Image (spheres, rainbow, N blue to C red):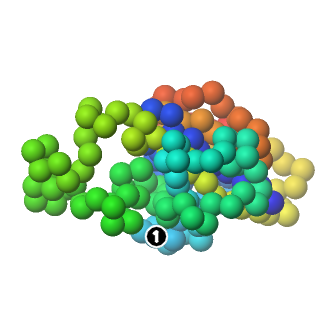
Amino acid sequence: MCSWFGAILLGTLSCASAPAQTSSGPTLVLRSPEQHGGSFSWRMCRRQAADAGGAAISSPGFLASDWQKAIVPGTVLNSLVHDGVYPEPYFGLNNAHERKLVPDISEVGRDFYTYWFRTEFSVPEEFRGRQVWLQFDGINYRAEVWLNGQRLSEPTVTMLPTGRD
């Protein structure tokens, strides 16, 4: 079983699909069931509240059942709104600065919206012996990528699709 998770260092994560795929052949799309009809349970936890680092968190079997549900593709704020922590910022005056319903990053700091995202998946048998590509269809600002206890990337700053083999 393989485990994938993204760590957001300075912002939010937006994995538009996060598929694992080969250059030709089958594709595994790691979307959450909430809002996207996927079949992978994603969890998220504020980095400061996590009791482990990336190596442990990205290892198969790491217990994250007490973490909040995450929406993938989506952002930290998107997931927090879905989980009922904050109201929909695009409705009425919910995002008005003076109402203080949604914490403003300029006041609470970057760490407030820095979260670990985590899911587990099994690599299908038809992937055996092939090069597998992890494709992220948009990281919203900055992320580290870990797989099975190994960091695959340094902090990445991007809003564009990116990937890793």
Q: Residue at x 55, y 69 (%)?
A: 38
Between 87 and 19, which is closer to the camera in this rendering? 87
Q: Residue 165, can we see it? A: no
Query: Does 48 appear above or below 154?
Result: below
- Residue identifier under label 1: 34
Relative to residue 98, is residue 44 drawn left or right? right
Residue 136's image quarter?
top right
**Label 1 Cα neighbours within 10 Å, binned few <14 / some 14-19 / many ≥20:** some
Q: Residue at x 49, y 47 (%)?
A: 46
Relative to residue 34, is residue 125 drawn left or right? right
Residue 54 x/y as whole percent: 67, 41
Query: Does 124 appear above or below 158?
Result: below
Q: Residue 97, can we see it? A: yes
Query: Does 25 appear above or below 146?
Result: below
Residue 149's image quarter?
top right
Residue 132 x/y as whole percent: 76, 47
Between 105 and 161, which is closer to the camera in this rendering? 105
Q: Quadrant of the C terminus?
A: top right
Residue 105 x/y as whole percent: 30, 37
Q: Extreme right residue here?
A: 129
**Which amino acid lies under the numbered mark 1 shown in the image of this protein?**
Glu
Q: How many numbered marks does the figure carry?
A: 1
Between 9 and 36, which is closer to the camera in this rendering? 9
Q: Residue at x 63, y 60 (%)?
A: 64
Q: Quadrant of the N terminus?
A: bottom right
Q: Residue at x 26, y 32 (%)?
A: 106
Residue 97 x/y as whole percent: 13, 43
Q: Element at badge 1?
A: loop
